Amino acid sequence: MNSRPLHQRTLHTQQMQHTQRSERTPSMHRHAPARRQRGTMLVISLIVLVSMTLAGVAMMRSVDTSAIVAGNIAFKQSSLNAADSGIQAGYTFLTANSGGATLYNDNNAAGVSSTGYFSSAPTTEPDWTNTNNWTNAGSINSGVADAGGNVVQYVIQRLCPIANCAPSAVCNGNTNVCGTTPDTTAISGEGTDQSSTNFFTRPPATHYRVTARVVGPRQSTAIVQTLLRTQ
């Protein structure tokens, strides 16, 4: 039989109930942050996923751009190499017709049969990127693209001011003074004025300019010029 007074038992019971509530309260507070933490991690995961997706897309686009740039450089180099065939065609024409009157006259009728030869040069430099300046040009393979997809054209210009006129000749009241290089390999008449062409065993070499243009894949374009001279 409990001999404690009633008010003491009541106070003891209230203290025990308060202690039990205090023991349950921390457990309830421990679960709440866990629920909030699971929601925060979901948001962070979504942000990381989106960031990785964007990074992957950017990398793929970068790789594609690099491949396109590398391809363009390769096509440009191929066009530049193909221009040598145009220069060679001009050189072949000049050497085959040097020493005669063929080079005194134009030979540039429009069409695939044109040799692209002009017996004079314009006073102003043409815009070689303008397609209209290639209407009378000569063509390699009759204008058909080569194995690399390059179309090669060339123009030969004699560096003289008057067309269809022999070097140093008088045409239409004007002397055709061409760009030339004197032939000094064998000179006669020592001790006299050798500035006259009469003292040279061969006539001066006339200057010519050969311009080649190549249009390749992806509109890659190369323009190459060289100077030649022949008797």
Image: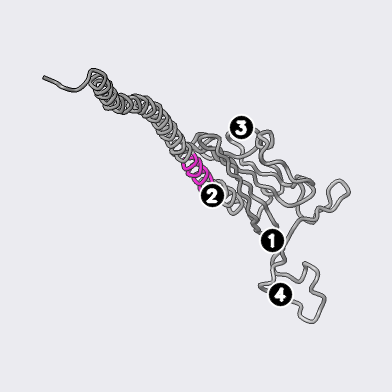
Q: Is residue 21 above or below residue 138?
A: above
Q: Earlier in the sequence, mark 3 or mark 1?
A: 3
Residue bearing the label numbered 1 = 205
In the rendered structure, the answer to whether residue 157 lies left or right of residue 3 reads: right
Which residue is the site of mark 2?
84
Q: CA distance from mark 4 to mark 2?
A: 36 Å
Tell which of 45 and 18 is nearer to you. 18
Q: What kind of element bears circle 2?
A: helix
Disc ID at residue 187: 4
Say which quadrant the C terminus sits in. Answer: bottom right
Give the answer, above or below, for where 144 lies relative to 179: above
- Kindly identify the amino acid type of the residue bearing the numbered disc 2: Asp
The tag earlier along the polypeptide, 2 or 3, is 2
Residue at figure coordinates x 74%, y 47% from the top left: 121
**Contact, CB < 8 Å: mark 4 with mark 2?**
no
In magenta stretch: residue 74: yes
User: What range of the chain is rendered magenta?
Assistant: 69-81
Q: Which residue is mark 3?
A: 111
Which is more toward the observer, 7 or 219?
7
At 74% from the left edge and 46% from the top edge, which residue is drawn?
125
Q: Tell me where residue 188 sits by quadrant.
A: bottom right
